[in-house]
Image: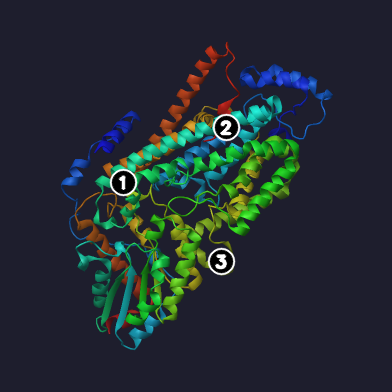
């Protein structure tokens, strides 16, 4: 609290009479009325790279096994069912009613891309997924790993996943405005984009999508709320966008979606 | 009017006769330096041609102040979360951004002021003055770090959004304040947005050596700088940081811009004037800037990237800011070449009240830079606490700029008053704010 008092004083001095509007924020998370609109401009979901193996699996009417390799931002503490992998599974099942879709999650908490990639061969032998969604970069950004090393690690990881016979989607960091002054995100976003380009795999630009939502006012990501509501809504929307992204990248036309 | 007239003043002689005159001139403020110009001219014929030439202290080079002020504003805006005003910052229109402008001008002005001091009063005195400046910048950096620490501690205790549990891992360093603070004092632990001052400190520390070499052989010095840059790229040299990683601005690479600025200040600009004046340079610059603009456009309008050959993309990316990518450096050169060409030294607009705020800010760059970093922190804080929309964002940016302007005005006013009373005792040592740079 001392820090708050200090900062407030300093702020007052600098002619920004910082209002103490925080008190209200704490009382109740401002849940928007009605379901949140998860609109994502189409260019954020556009990708040239394709998911051939997913497309084949659906065409052959085989079960679609998806593995999400992520970190702590893959989940919501104590509400696993609302996290984006769970939502992805639910929505893909709606979109592809005829195929069994199963999404499993492999959490690599507090691991850098390099540390996570080290276990990929074993992991792939155990799970044998058709599609791997690899979400990474946050831990590397927090620890400010050398971006070149990070790129190398992501490259190695993607290669390992591809060699194991899976389609790969890379997912980048969350947009986190509160920590923007503390974590330098751009180098990691850039390098993930480069790896995706080099390997011609789709990149799910979670950062840009979430920033879009924040800028458009759909979500207030500055909100310091302790409640899980905001997180649930954001993950629901992420799951929806991700499902759409998978369907588009696999070029599943309406025909396959309905059959 | 030729470029040569725009970029240079008169050469100064380095003889003993001239020395006594110049010693006075460096103590004097710009306003009363004019008579010295004439005396220096008289001294000139007797002097052996010095290796470097300095423009006479006369009118301030307002273009430098203008663009440094602009760079300060842009750095401030870039440090805030993206908002409406962000679209006016140059990094959206090409490879280089305000940092390049800032470091170049800092090199230019530092060489200008301390290069003169080195000619006038010798290497030891000049070095001492440079070190004093370094100390000021260091103190400013530590001050900013303290504010950052207060902010981050507050965020750590108040922010518990379950969406961002992972990102909160950044607070882990608070668990070891002993190590963290010592590392910060050693410049190894630097929070985001606080990378420019440490870079500047290192560059200023190297300045005595740079100037000493330049006094001897300016072109060789620039050549050595280029060589160091190349070696840095070749062998991937870097400054390590705490807890891991490296400096976000690699001084071994960024020194190129600084030394180039110094080289220009010490006569290089005049020698390049013919190149700068040639239409070929102009068209190459325009073509390059246009190409860079197009590439930048593809970042925001991904549909355009269909027209980008994959091979070029693979060769070009990533455009490395840490090591001052060649693409960034050349982009800055192109911008500078066009600026010098189309904005003459005596452009009447430089005196217009509209540009006054920018020029004022540029004249007190260290203070205003620090204020800008602080205001960016404060802006983040307000956005977080009051949860602002785009309107609030823009408002904060505007207020920040107004505050920077007001502060620059106050400092100017104070210096004027202080100079008036101080001029009787002649205690003004050099023109520190001209050499400033933060």
Disc 2 chain ID: B
Q: Residue at x 39, y 75 (%)?
A: A120
Residue B206 visible: yes
Distance from disc 1 to disc 3, alpha carbons, whole Å, reads 37 Å
Q: Which residue is mark 1?
A: B389
Task: Please determine whether, in this image, residue B40 is positioned above or below residue A173.
Answer: above
Task: Please determine whether, in this image, residue B305 is positioned above or below residue A220.
Answer: below
Q: Do the residues marked 2 and 1 share a common chain?
A: yes
Q: Which mark is residue A254?
A: none
> x, y percentage for residue A74?
30, 65
> x, y percentage for residue B228?
65, 50
> x, y percentage for residue B109?
61, 33
Around disc 2, counting alpha carbons within 10 Å, would you say few (fewer than 14), some (14 to 19), or many (20 or more)?
Answer: some
Disc 3 chain ID: B
Tell me: B394 left or right of A235.
right
Disc 1 chain ID: B
Q: Residue furthest top?
A: B424
Residue at disc 1, secondary structure: loop
Q: Which residue is mark 3?
A: B314
Q: Residue at x 75, y 18 (%)?
A: B39
Q: Which mark is residue B131?
A: 2
Residue B395 visible: no
Distance from disc 2 to disc 1, alpha carbons, whole Å, reads 44 Å
Q: Residue at x 60, y 47 (%)?
A: B332
Residue at disc 2, secondary structure: helix
Picture quadrant of residue B153:
top left
Residue in the foreground of this view, choosing between B70 and A43: B70
Around disc 3, counting alpha carbons within 10 Å, would you say few (fewer than 14), some (14 to 19), or many (20 or more)?
Answer: few
Task: Please determine whether, in this image, residue A205 is positioned above or below residue A58.
Answer: above
């Amino acid at each position: 609290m001392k820090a708050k008092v200090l900062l407030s004083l300093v702020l007052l001095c600098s002619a920004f009479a910082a209002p103490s509007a925080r008190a209200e924020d704490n009382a109740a998370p401002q849940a928007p009325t009605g379901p949140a609109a998860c609109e994502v401009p189409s260019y954020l979901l556009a990708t040239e790279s394709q998911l051939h193996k997913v497309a084949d699996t659906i065409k052959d009417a085989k079960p679609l096994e998806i593995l999400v390799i992520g970190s702590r931002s893959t989940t919501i503490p104590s509400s696993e069912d609302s996290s984006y992998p769970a939502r992805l599974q639910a929505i893909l099942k709606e979109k592809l009613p005829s195929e069994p879709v199963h999404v499993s999650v492999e959490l690599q908490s507090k691991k850098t891309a390099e540390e996570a990639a080290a276990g990929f061969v074993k992991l792939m032998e155990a799970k044998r997924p058709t599609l791997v969604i690899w979400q990474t970069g946050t831990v590397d950004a927090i620890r400010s790993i050398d971006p070149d090393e990070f790129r190398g690690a992501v490259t190695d990881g993607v290669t390992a996943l591809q060699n194991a016979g899976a389609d790969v989607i890379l997912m980048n960091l969350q947009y986190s405005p509160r920590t923007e002054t503390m974590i330098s995100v751009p180098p990691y976003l850039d390098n993930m984009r480069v790896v995706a380009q080099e390997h011609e795999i789709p990149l799910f630009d979670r950062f840009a999508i979430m920033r879009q939502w924040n800028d458009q006012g759909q979500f207030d990501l500055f909100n310091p709320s302790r409640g899980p509501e905001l997180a649930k809504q954001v993950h629901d929307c992420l799951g929806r966008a991700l499902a759409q992204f998978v369907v588009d990248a696999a070029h599943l036309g309406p025909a396959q979606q309905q059959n | 009017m030729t470029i040569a007239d725009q970029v240079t003043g008169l050469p100064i002689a380095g003889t003993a006769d001239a020395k006594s005159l110049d010693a006075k001139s460096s103590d004097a403020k710009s306003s009363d330096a004019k008579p010295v110009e004439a005396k220096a001219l008289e001294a000139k014929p007797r002097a052996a041609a010095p290796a470097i030439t300095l423009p006479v202290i006369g009118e301030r080079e307002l273009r430098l102040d203008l663009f440094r002020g602009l760079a300060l504003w842009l750095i401030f805006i870039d440090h805030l979360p993206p908002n409406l005003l962000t679209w006016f910052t140059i990094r959206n229109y090409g490879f280089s951004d305000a940092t390049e402008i800032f470091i170049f001008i800092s090199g230019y002005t530092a060489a200008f002021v301390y290069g003169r001091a080195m000619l006038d009063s010798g290497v030891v005195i000049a070095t001492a003055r440079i070190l004093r400046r370094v100390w000021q910048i260091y103190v400013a950096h530590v001050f900013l770090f303290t504010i950052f620490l207060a902010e981050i501690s507050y965020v750590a205790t108040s922010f518990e959004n379950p969406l961002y549990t992972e990102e909160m891992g950044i607070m882990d360093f608070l668990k070891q304040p002993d190590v963290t603070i010592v590392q910060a004092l050693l410049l190894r632990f630097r929070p985001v947005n606080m990378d420019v001052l440490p870079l500047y400190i290192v560059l200023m520390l190297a300045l005595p050596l740079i100037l000493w070499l330049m006094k001897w052989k300016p072109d060789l010095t620039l050549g050595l700088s280029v060589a160091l840059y190349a070696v840095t790229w070749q062998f991937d040299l870097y400054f390590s940081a705490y807890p891991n990683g490296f400096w976000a601005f690699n001084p071994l690479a960024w020194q190129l811009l600084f030394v180039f600025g110094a080289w220009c200040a010490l006569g290089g600009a005049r020698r390049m004037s013919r190149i700068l004046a040639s239409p070929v340079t102009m068209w190459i610059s325009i073509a390059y800037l246009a190409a860079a603009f197009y590439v930048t456009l593809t970042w925001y309008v991904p549909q355009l990237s269909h027209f980008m050959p994959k091979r070029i993309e693979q060769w070009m990316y990533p455009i490395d800011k840490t090591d001052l990518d060649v693409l960034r450096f050349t982009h800055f050169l192109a911008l500078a070449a066009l600026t010098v060409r189309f904005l003459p030294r005596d452009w009447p607009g430089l005196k217009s009240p509209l540009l006054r705020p920018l020029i004022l800010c540029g004249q007190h760059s260290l203070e205003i830079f620090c204020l800008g970093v602080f205001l960016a922190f404060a802006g983040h804080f307000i956005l977080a606490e009051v949860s602002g929309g785009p309107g609030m964002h823009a408002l904060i940016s505007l207020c920040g700029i107004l505050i920077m302007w007001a502060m620059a005005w106050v400092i100017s006013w104070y210096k004027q008053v202080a100079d008036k009373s101080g001029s009787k005792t002649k205690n003004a040592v050099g023109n520190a704010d001209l050499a400033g740079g933060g």
